[in-house]
Amino acid sequence: MGGAVSAGEDNDDLIDNLKEAQYIRTERVEEAFRAIDRGDYYLDSYRDSAYKDLAWKHGNIHLSAPCIYSEVMEALKLQPGLSFLNLGSGTGYLSTMVGLIIGPFGVNHGVELHKDVVEYARDKLDSFIKTSDSFDKFEFCEPVFVVGDFLEIATDSHQYDRIYCGAGVQKDHEYYMKELLKVGGILVLPIEDQLTQITRMGQCMWESKNILAVSFAPLVQQSRADGDKPDSVQLPPVAVRTLQDLCRIYIRRTLRELAGSGDEDSQALRAGAQRVPQKRKRRHCRRRRINTYVFVGNQLIPQMVESEEEHADEEHKDAEEEDEEEEDKEERDLGDVEILKQANVFRDQILALPLPESLKDYLLYYRKK
């Protein structure tokens, strides 16, 4: 499913279209979408299709249409510190965006049936952490992916604040997924061709709301020989962060806050994700005269009068020269913008600290850039 919005030329263009169509409605969701380039989750040979509002599948690798993901993100009503479970986590694209919102004190788990897809998701996650400047603008809850059939999750597993299922669900599996949800939690899943939001109001109380008509591939279960006992899936433990990890979180938070209180030039550098402004289009005017009539005494006499277009045309040469000067200035400004886009003031601050190189590397998550 997809095609609800126009194709974009890049990730920002795609997000602009999703906002205009009201699929993205909150600032928090918009920031997460802009931080994660959808094209990075495509194979290189298919990247040209990344910014179309269409689903993509290659072998076991699958991405839903952007309009679906945006509706899911809005329906989950994410907040910092929540726990999230992604059933059928796929490439990790959605889980990574969720991690930007729930932050370092949340829980971010994913279960995926195909081992090759889990390896693909881990590679993409590692690339985001190591190479994306967007990573330094957020406090992140890193997703943890496990291989297995999510219909075989161990019965003693913990419950979650938010759950998403990325495959078409049979009605008889609905209750199974509800039981993984905490009271007050939200489950979003496609069921009976409807993307549905289910809120757990109490131990046996549920509230359902249809969000969007969708068409999802049906849920695939792990194949096994007749009589074989299915493998139970053990979800990752919810572990307390180490003191070392807490120190890194708070040092980076402090530096980020300090970076946000600098002068205007520093703030411009920190706006690294700003978009390159588009050049202003020239206005081309046509010379034209209009037949009209005026009264002279008692007579009606035809007269040629000047139109507004002709008046505009008289200034066309001067305006064209001004446009050329402005475009030259814009081209110089574009060069400055490209420099700004490459700057990462936060990273430079860490590198400037009087600390051992090994500690700087740890604070930077061993980033390559």
Image: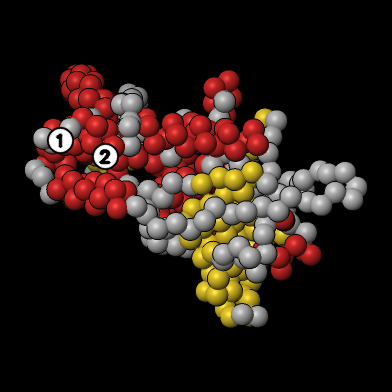
Element carrying mark 2: helix
Q: What residue sits 51% from the left and 65% below the top?
A: 161
Element carrying mark 1: loop
- In contact (CB < 8 Å): disc 1 and disc 2: yes
Question: How many neighbours does mark 2 have within 10 angstroms: few (below 14), some (14-19), or many (20 or more)?
Answer: some
Q: What residue sits 44% from the left and 31% below the top?
A: 127
Question: How many neighbours does mark 1 have within 10 angstroms: few (below 14), some (14-19), or many (20 or more)?
Answer: few
Residue 220's tag is: none
| Residue 207 shows in the view | yes
Three-letter code, disc 2: Leu
Taking 224 as reference, is 244 left or right?
Answer: left
Q: Residue 152's quadrant in the figure? A: bottom right
Residue 355's tag is: 1
Q: Residue 66's quadrant in the figure? A: top right
Instruction: Give the position of the N terminus as an image quadrant.
Output: top right
Task: Tell me which colouring the rendered structure shows.
Answer: secondary structure
